[in-house]
Image (tube, coloured by chain):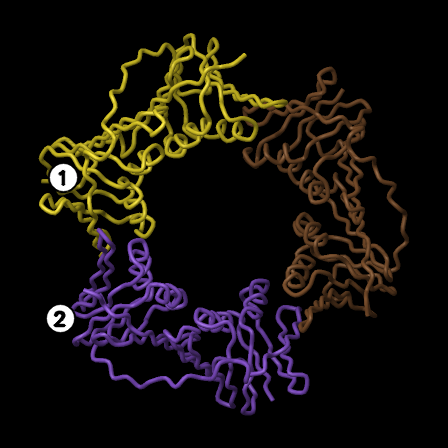
Chain colours: A yellow, B purple, C brown
Amino acid sequence: MFKATIDADILKSSIETLSVLVDEARFRISPEGLSVRAVDPANVAMLSFELSSDAFDEFSADDCEIGMDLSKINDIFSVAGRDDKVTMELDEMSQKMSLRLGGLSYTLALLDPSTIRAEPRIPQLELPAEAVLNGKELQRAVKAAEKISDHMLLGVEADVFYMEAEGDTDRVRLEMPKSELIDLKSGDARSLFSLDYLSDIVKPASKSNEITIELGKDFPVKIGFSIANGAGKIGYLLAPRIESD
Amino acid sequence: MFKATIDADILKSSIETLSVLVDEARFRISPEGLSVRAVDPANVAMLSFELSSDAFDEFSADDCEIGMDLSKINDIFSVAGRDDKVTMELDEMSQKMSLRLGGLSYTLALLDPSTIRAEPRIPQLELPAEAVLNGKELQRAVKAAEKISDHMLLGVEADVFYMEAEGDTDRVRLEMPKSELIDLKSGDARSLFSLDYLSDIVKPASKSNEITIELGKDFPVKIGFSIANGAGKIGYLLAPRIESD
Amino acid sequence: MFKATIDADILKSSIETLSVLVDEARFRISPEGLSVRAVDPANVAMLSFELSSDAFDEFSADDCEIGMDLSKINDIFSVAGRDDKVTMELDEMSQKMSLRLGGLSYTLALLDPSTIRAEPRIPQLELPAEAVLNGKELQRAVKAAEKISDHMLLGVEADVFYMEAEGDTDRVRLEMPKSELIDLKSGDARSLFSLDYLSDIVKPASKSNEITIELGKDFPVKIGFSIANGAGKIGYLLAPRIESD
């Protein structure tokens, strides 16, 4: 059983955070809320998503798992107004989900969860450095880097968090000293990442005033932020590329 | 003889209502105003358009008929400001129309009306059901339906007007009870229409706060609304598709 | 030596005026400011650009010449905010330019000026007629003309400045009497120009409230305006096309 009502806006943002990495997702539903864990088809990035029942106006659910085609949900939101409430209701017999918003009612066929790639095991990493900043700053550096390269360095040097990209002849660097960051935990950290993935991840991350970037030396980066006034949490884990010298 | 001045905005809206079905049109000009009757190249939809001389600031005309390439007029309006007045004047000798707006003067060659498809005879249909609603509601249903199908049902059931589309696995439905409509005449009505045509027709119709949809059982739909504070009337007649069960 | 700080907005506008004709430019730098003279690859249009040191917040320079890829600078501005200040500094040893704006620092490789087409000699023409008008008026006429032709006449007849284009069957004309112009010097002037070039030139020119158009009979047109509150001056010289009768 699953029946819930939520701001269309919150559901829309939630789906966006998922669809930057995957087209279809397995949602774990429990009385506490929804969660998704997924890995992109190339095994380069993982995400962990949790939306507590507190984010909903109404929420009643038993434990279950459903598969959804995220592009269908995005299609629905391209028609919906922003302020609408969405009511979702699962019909377990027919394996269909109904969505009602602003007078429109949709009936969507669900996907068999077993046809969707299994949930990844997300490694527990202890990363030595951590910078907390406005998502827009990361987006700005990523957009600048894309103009000259296809990968970008993220690192911490003394009390400065930096993002840097180098093309054949040109270089761009954004330095943020501790005083310009919301918070900084210094540590030995410098890793190279694919801009393909970073530009996807910054799309939802740039809407958050406070994102946390955890880094190590040639280690994956963890980029985390919350949505729905803290009732939703999203974390990305992106594998590093090997830096060729 | 034909010479007239009108708000560029009204002329622009008028041309839009025509160009969703045809590229060239025969305008019948009389001392009472302008009118067009046209059928689309595939014979699926017809339109009847009337713009009374009341819609004009100045209007003097003898009975005549001219042919115009609508895309040329649209090109002109893509340059014109919205507030401008347009003055049109026919030069019968050279078969050219001059248009002056905001300092620019255009001289357009007319088309020989006999090269444009003849005016269709528009059938007089008595349709049992009628719903009056804001054009934006129809547009919303059409946009939602386009995501999952290429045709859409329109119908009336008891005191509810509904629009519904069904894809291979999914379904979307917008129901509007009488209380949410401007007016409803109930009757036995349910017909299926091509979304290709409906999406074109809703473009101008969505700008009207009050459109009238007349329906029957597997019968054409009539979609009518007025422009220029009632001085212009436009009606579309769209043939139904056969519903396969 | 060259080090300077300027509003990003002014530098951006400056680069736009150049990039409508060329992709790479030789900048002459002196203690008085920057200047560029360039001719487009087809030898149809020339430009002369001067930006006085007064346009800068800080400016210190020795005489030198540098070559820059304008698209790289445009890329940088597509990321920068509009209000930012830009600081440029030349590293003569490595032939690189550093640009810092809003926390981002770019290091761009310069081009060897000798690989960029030599500065053209810009002919001193005494043109008999001159119209001063808002750049938006020229843009409006150019956009209207583009719909029906690939060239446009500019001319002066008695106290009227006119722009006219003629297609196979249609014609558009914008007349501006002296009373609608900022200024007019009447003279025998009527020349035909390529709309390809005019549409590029009007992009930056349309942002100026006051552009000066100097004309003769089958002679080049000079289109001039200023930027940065008069501290920058840009002039285009466009060769006429032969009018076939």
Tell how many labels: 2
Q: Quadrant of the N terminus of chain C?
A: top right
Image mark 1: chain: A
**C185 to the left or right of A113:** right
Image quarter of residue B137:
bottom left
What's the amino acid at mark 2? Answer: Ala
Nearer to me, C55 or A33: A33
Q: Is residue C231 visible?
A: yes
Q: Quarter of the image containing the C terminus of chain C? A: bottom right
The answer to whether residue B58 shows anywhere in this view is: no
Specify whether A192 is left or right of B91. left
Going by the numbered disc 1, the residue's amino acid type is Phe
Give the residue at x 34% y 30%: A41
Q: CA distance from mark 1 to mark 2?
A: 33 Å
Which chain is home to disc 2? B
A133 vs B208: above or below: above
| Picture disc at residue B196 | none
Residue under the point 63% across and 73% down: B100
Q: Is residue A8 left or right of residue C80?
A: left
Q: Residue furthest front?
A: B244
Question: Tag 1's secondary structure?
Answer: strand
- Label placed on residue A59: 1
Mark in the foreground, 1 or 2: 2
Q: Position of residue A164 (x, y in %)?
A: 52, 20
**Would you say A228 lies left or right of C127 here?**
left
Image quadrant assignment for residue B95: bottom right
**On the image, numbered disc 2 is attached to which residue?**
B158
Q: Residues within 10 Å of mark 1 (few under 14, many from 20)?
A: many
Report x, y in % for residue B53.
49, 84
